[in-house]
Image (spheres, grey):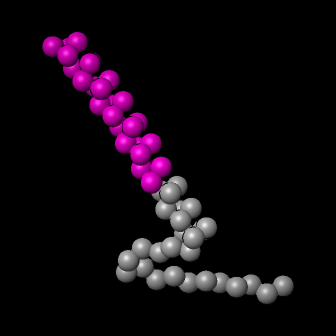
Amino acid sequence: MKEKTKEKKERNDALYVEVLDLRKGQEAIEERARDELGMIKENETFFQVIEEK
C-alpha cells in the first residue's frame, strides 16, 4: 500500500511540474503577442502610456 501511494505521489508531482511548464509557456506566448504584435484579449481594455522626455 505504501509503495503504491509513493508511486502515485511521484506521478502526481511530475504531472504538476508539467502543468506549471505548460502554463508558463502559454503566459510567455501571450506576453510576446501583446508586446510585439499589440494584441489584446476579447473584452480587455488597452491603455498606452507615452512618456515625453
In the image: residue 19, left or right of residue 49:
left
For residue 6, above or below residue 50: above
Residue lying at 41% horizontally and 45% vertically, measured from the top left: 22
Q: Is residue 7 left or right of residue 33?
A: left
Most foreground residue, 38 or 22:
38
**Chief secondary structure of the magenta portion:** helix
Quick one: which residue is furthest to the front in this view? 37
User: Total marks drawn?
Assistant: 0
Find residue 26 and report its horizontal and vertical position in percent: 44, 54
Q: Position of residue 15 (x, y in %)?
A: 33, 34
Asked which quadrant contains residue 4, the reply is top left
Q: Can you name the residue that lies furthest to the right here? A: 53
Question: Furthest residue to the left?
Answer: 1
Image quadrant occupied by the C terminus: bottom right
Q: Is residue 27 above or below residue 9?
A: below
- Left or right of 46 in this view: 50: right
For image coordinates 51% across by 82% down, the residue present is 46
Q: Position of residue 2 (x, y in %)?
A: 20, 14
Based on the picture, tell me whether residue 28 belongs to the magenta stretch: no
- Residue 40 percent across, percent down from the top left: 47, 75
Residue in the image at 15% along x and 13% along y: 1
Q: Which residues are magenta?
A: 1-26
Please tell me which residue is depicted at 50% across the width and 57% down the height of the picture.
29
Question: Image check: 1 left or right of 47?
Answer: left
Rendered image quadrant of residue 12: top left
In the image, residue 5 lies in the stretch drawn in magenta:
yes
